[in-house]
């Protein structure tokens, strides 16, 4: 028992140190967001004092220079639309794969798994050209692109959950006259709720922070997400308004951190629900 307690404290200490290492860059960004931009590059690790403290000036300048509020709206539109589309389409697809179980369904499942291991760099240039040709260079066109890239992980998790659902529940509902959509949305979806929430969290964190995919596909003259808008703070000859950039980074981080803290308890529950034997 003493050895277990000792090892427990060691693991706690180890992961505490790792957590501090991961959190420190976020703390550093928050710290520098209140400092004058000329002092950030001189001593990024110093605490703001009377001479270097500028209050919320960096935040105001960042919002004005990047039109961050408009970028926030487009980021919300892209994230919410993409996540909703991913959840609806992949949950239905996973249900079909498990319940049909024929060669076509198994082949489709393998293709989804293959989607998870293909490097994005292999398809990004072709994707950029095709998205322009098909008119997908809009926020709602980006929903479809994110559906393609996010389907692999979602189907993988959902199929594991659906395999654990007794098929007799669906058969009983069918005998009582329930239609297929009703069986799915009133019986299957409520049971899948923890995994649906966990997938929604993972996909939201990915899409909200994504820079490369929107940058390759969106029409930059009309639409900019928050990561792209912040990147535009870079001026000519490599000059960067570090103060405004730090302020914008904090504003971009806060919504997704709050969202994660509210929903984090569902992540492990949902992943464990999908980690079952088929």
Image: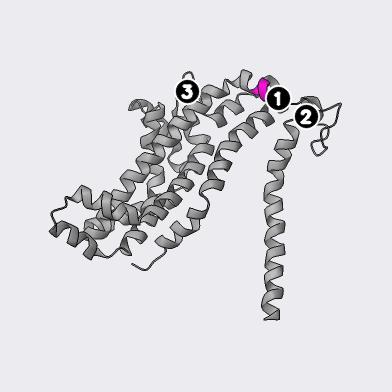
Give residue 88's position: percent from left, percent from top.
32, 44
Q: Alpha-carbon neighbours of circle 2 within 10 Å: few (<14), some, or many (≥20)?
A: many
Residue 58 disc label: 1
Mark 2 or mark 1, earlier in chain = 2
Question: Height in image: 248 above or below 14?
Answer: above
Distance between mark 1 and mark 3 Cα atoms:
23 Å
Residue at the spot 21% in from the left edge and 47% down from the top edge: 181
Marks 2 and 1 in Cβ contact (< 8 Å): yes
Asked if residue 45 is positioned above or below residue 15 in the image, the reply reads above
Q: Is residue 20 magenta?
A: no
Q: How far is the residue under mark 2 from the one under mark 1?
A: 8 Å
Residue at horizontal 51 percent and vertical 48 percent from the top? 263
Where residue 45 sits: x, y (%)? 80, 39
| Residue identified by numbered label 2 | 35
Q: State the image coordinates of residue 6 (x, y, percent, origin top left).
A: 72, 74
User: Quadrant of residue 150 in the image?
Assistant: top left
Quarter of the image where the N terminus is located: bottom right
Q: State the residue at coordinates (44%, 46%).
A: 200
Does 186 sit left or right of 219 as displayed? left
Q: Which residue is mark 3?
A: 223
**Label 1 crowd bin: few (<14), some (14–19), many (20+), radius 10 Å:** many
Q: Residue furthest bottom?
A: 1
């Amino acid at each position: 028992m003493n050895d277990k307690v000792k090892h427990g404290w060691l693991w706690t200490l180890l992961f505490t140190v790792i957590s501090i290492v991961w959190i420190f860059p976020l703390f550093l960004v928050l710290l520098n967001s209140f400092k004058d931009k000329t002092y950030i590059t001189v001593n990024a690790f110093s605490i703001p004092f009377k001479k270097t403290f500028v209050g919320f000036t960096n935040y105001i300048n960042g919002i004005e220079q990047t039109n961050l509020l408009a970028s926030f709206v487009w980021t919300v539109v892209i994230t919410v639309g993409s996540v909703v589309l991913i959840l609806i389409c992949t949950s239905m697809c996973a249900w079909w794969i498990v319940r049909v179980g024929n060669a076509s369904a198994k082949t489709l499942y393998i293709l989804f798994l293959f989607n998870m291991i293909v490097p994005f760099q292999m398809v990004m240039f072709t994707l950029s050209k095709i998205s322009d040709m098909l008119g997908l260079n809009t926020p709602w066109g980006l929903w479809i692109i994110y559906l393609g890239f996010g389907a692999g992980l979602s189907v993988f998790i959902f199929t594991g959950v659906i395999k654990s659902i007794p098929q007799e529940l669906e058969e009983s509902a069918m005998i009582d006259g329930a239609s297929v959509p009703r069986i799915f949305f009133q019986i299957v979806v409520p049971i899948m709720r923890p995994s649906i929430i966990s997938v929604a969290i993972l996909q939201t964190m990915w899409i909200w922070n994504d820079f490369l995919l929107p940058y390759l596909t969106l029409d930059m003259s009309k639409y900019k997400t928050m990561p792209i808008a912040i990147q535009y703070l870079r001026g000519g000859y490599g000059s960067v308004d570090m103060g405004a950039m730090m302020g914008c980074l904090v504003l971009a981080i806060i919504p997704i951190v709050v969202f994660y803290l509210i929903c984090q308890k569902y992540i492990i529950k949902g992943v464990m629900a999908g980690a079952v034997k088929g």
